[in-house]
Image (cartoon, grey):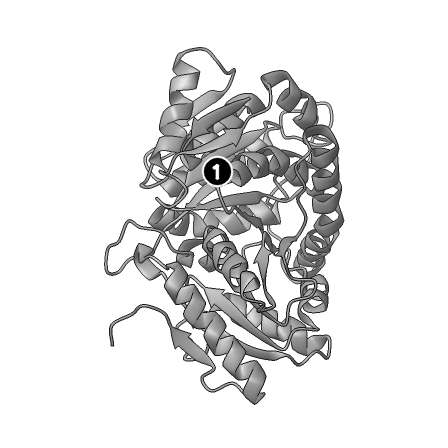
């Protein structure tokens, strides 16, 4: 069924169809609509969910952790400072291996105060032990939310599905929704092996864990993240068989024979595809690698796909303030180095605080790549796009 939905509406509709047991949330721009729309579904009796209105995002994630530990299928939504206020609890959710799903709408972090989209909030949580899946558009946001339930419950790790604030969250697109029954069949029922309300099989959760076993438990968490790679592919395959849309770790766009390419996440991939098409019409072998799964980081697969390129531009919509590069650049180049691939690489930081990136700026990046591949050297390793200096 093809319908016009914003990214927030698409994520809320996916949540309605999933019908989680508990949603606990403290709305924040630009994610407010996700839980506002969902709370109306609750009020209208369209879902069976218990909606828990709390006084902060820290409390929202705390309530999610409690409900998930008790054996419920749990979801929430947040953004920016809200996600940052959850940071402490994100580590606890992952460490306790609770399959919570968050609809995260990417937004800049203060200061200065800014309500528009960049990836600073999600990147700040990249090492919290959560699977992170980025969406290019509303369709992917909808599809990723549905898949996230199965990924989380099979890996026993929490999952964050992201969209770009206002660019996707508030822009209306036509998406292909599947029926409620089909979503219900795909996500299935939730039957956790262990949960705190199972009084016949009591167990302890979240106890103190010092030098005796803490390390072993964190190792198990790390192994679970490695194992989630196969689970993500399996869920993607099942989704394709049932609904026809294909999802993996990343999307290759005219990359197989490309000589130069851009690597990016989220909505910028759509803008880049337009430029790739224009360059291809001129005979320039340009391509794109759009990262969908950032955690776990599929470093071997990414490095292999990029290994034959002459020059690569890696775009970051956040900065690390390390006096080096953005987070995506450091991880992609580390992957290339560890696999003994040495294409020319350059980093572009762009779009902080919601500043637009347009096709002309993407073309300029490709022109830099053409020059670097011809001269076989990178003139400037790290650049900032569209910022007044």
Q: In which quarter of the image is residue 374?
A: bottom right
Along the line of sight, the residue nearer the viewer: 362 or 38 = 362
Instruction: Say if residue 121 shows up in the picture.
Output: yes
Above or below, comparing residue 368 to residue 279 in the picture:
below
Along the line of sight, the residue nearer the viewer: 240 or 325 = 240
Secondary structure of the residue carrying numbered label 1: helix
Q: Where is residue 281 in the image (x, y as percent from the top left)?
A: 55, 61
Q: In which quarter of the image is residue 357?
A: bottom left
On screen, residue 351 versus residue 298, left or right, reads left
Along the line of sight, the residue nearer the viewer: 21 or 117 = 117
| Number of other residues with Cα within 10 Å of mark 1, as a class: few under 14, some 14 to 19, many 20 or more | many
> Which residue in the structure is indicated by mark 1?
138
Q: How many numbered circles are shown? A: 1
Which residue is rendered at x = 72% and y = 55% of the image?
226
Along the line of sight, the residue nearer the viewer: 288 or 208 = 288
Q: Position of residue 173 (x, y in %)?
A: 43, 34
Which residue is rendered at x = 59% and y = 27% of the image?
72
């Amino acid at each position: 069924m093809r319908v016009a939905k914003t990214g927030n509406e698409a994520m809320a509709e996916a949540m309605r169809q999933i019908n989680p047991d508990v949603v606990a949330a403290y709305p924040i721009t630009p994610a407010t609509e996700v839980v506002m729309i969902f709370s109306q579904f609750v009020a209208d009796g369209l879902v069976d969910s218990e909606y828990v209105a709390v006084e902060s995002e820290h409390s929202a994630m705390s309530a999610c952790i409690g409900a998930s530990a008790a054996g419920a299928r749990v979801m929430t939504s947040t953004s920016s400072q809200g996600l940052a206020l959850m940071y402490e609890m994100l580590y606890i959710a992952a460490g306790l291996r609770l399959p919570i799903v968050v609809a995260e709408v990417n937004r800049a972090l203060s200061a200065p105060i800014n309500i528009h989209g960049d990836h600073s909030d999600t990147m700040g949580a990249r090492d919290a032990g959560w699977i992170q899946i980025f969406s290019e558009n509303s369709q992917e946001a909808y599809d990723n939310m549905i898949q996230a339930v199965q990924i989380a419950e099979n890996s026993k790790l929490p999952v964050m599905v992201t969209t770009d604030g206002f660019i996707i969250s508030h822009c209306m697109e036509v998406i292909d929704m599947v029926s409620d029954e089909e979503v219900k069949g795909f996500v299935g029922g939730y039957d956790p092996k262990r949960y705190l309300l199972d009084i016949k099989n009591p167990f302890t959760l979240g106890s103190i864990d010092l030098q005796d076993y803490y390390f072993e438990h964190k190792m198990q968490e790390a192994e679970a993240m490695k194992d989630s790679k196969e689970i993500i592919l399996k869920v993607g395959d099942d989704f394709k068989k049932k609904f026809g849309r294909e999802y993996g770790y990343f999307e290759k766009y005219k990359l197989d024979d490309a000589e130069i390419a851009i690597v990016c996440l989220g909505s910028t991939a759509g803008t880049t595809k337009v430029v790739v098409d224009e360059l291809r019409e001129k005979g320039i072998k340009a391509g794109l690698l759009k990262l969908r799964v950032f955690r776990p980081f599929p470093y071997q697969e990414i490095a292999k796909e990029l290994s034959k390129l002459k020059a690569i531009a890696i775009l970051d919509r956040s900065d690390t303030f390390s006096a080096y590069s953005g987070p995506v650049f450091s991880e992609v180049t580390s992957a290339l180095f560890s696999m003994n691939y040495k294409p020319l690489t350059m980093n572009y930081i762009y779009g902080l605080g919601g500043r637009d990136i347009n096709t002309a700026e993407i073309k300029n990046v490709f022109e830099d790549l053409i020059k670097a591949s011809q001269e076989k050297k990178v003139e400037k390793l790290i650049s900032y796009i569209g910022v007044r200096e």
